[in-house]
Amino acid sequence: MKKILFPLLAIAIICVILLGTYFYLDYQKENSSETYVGNSRAECSTIEFFCVQGYERFDDDHGCGCKPTNIFLNTTEKHFCTSEQRQAEVCTEIYSPVCGYVQVECIRAPCNPVPETFSNECFACGNERVQYFTKGEC
């Protein structure tokens, strides 16, 4: 009985240590200002993503994502989506609202774009009808 109990106790202790480490690292990722998009270097090498303005890409041992920068922009300036922004496969869930100006189907001219709030510029540029956006909610 003692011969079986000691190995089982050792395995249980190792499992607790591994799970504790996993949950600690996960907690660290959630409570930092960094937002992870990929959870490993291998995954990050296969995905293409775009960080919203005010954030920049980072890569570390836990994956990749976006972290804040110290760039402050004029909130009324028009920003036009780049081809890189239009082709992003994944958008981060960082709430940094923008007002996208969406071109509508025109029945009678003039047809001005309709303002619509998007959670960030990545989601705005993901909409092919957005002509440009400004910082902040509409």
Image (cartoon, rainbow, N blue to C red):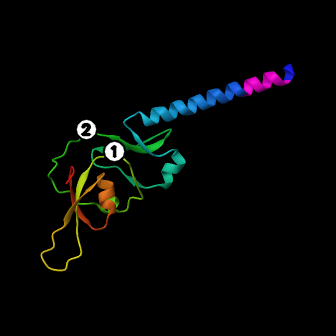
Residue 70 disc label: 2
- Report the residue that reaches farthest toward the left: 110
Instruction: Tell me the chief SS of the magenta region.
Output: helix
Q: Quadrant of residue 107?
A: bottom left
- Asked if the stretch drawn in magenta spans residue 34, the answer is no
Earlier along the polypeptide chain: callout 1 or callout 2?
Answer: 1
The residue positioned 48% from the left and 33% from the top of the image is 27
Up/down of 91 relative to 56, above or below: below
Q: From the viewer's perspective, tell me whether residue 74 is left or right of residue 10.
A: left
**Vertical placement of 55 versus 121: above or below?**
above
Magenta segment range? 4-11
| Quarter of the view holding residue 131 | bottom left
Q: Secondary structure at mark 1?
A: strand
Note whether 38 is above or below 11 in the view shown. below
> The residue tagged with tag 2: helix, strand or loop?
loop
Mark seen at residue 56: 1
Q: Amino acid at mark 2?
A: Asn
Q: x%, y% of residue 52?
A: 31, 49
How crowded pointer 1 is (Cα within 10 Å; few <14, some 14-19, many 20+) is rated as some
| Residue type indicated by callout 1 | Glu
Label 2 CA crowd tier, 10 Å (few <14, some 14–19, many 20+): few
Q: Where is 111 relative to 73, above or below?
A: below
x and y, in percent, of residue 125 in the image: 30, 60
As measured in the structure, the alpha-carbon distance from the residue carrying label 1 to the one carrying label 2 is 10 Å
Q: Is residue 98 left or right of residue 3?
A: left
Residue drawn where x is 21% and y is 50% of the image? 135
Q: Position of residue 36 (x, y in %)?
A: 44, 43
Quadrant of the rendering where the C terminus is positioned:
bottom left
Location of the N terminus by quadrant is: top right
Residue 109's disc is: none
Residue 99 x, y percent position in the rendering: 22, 56
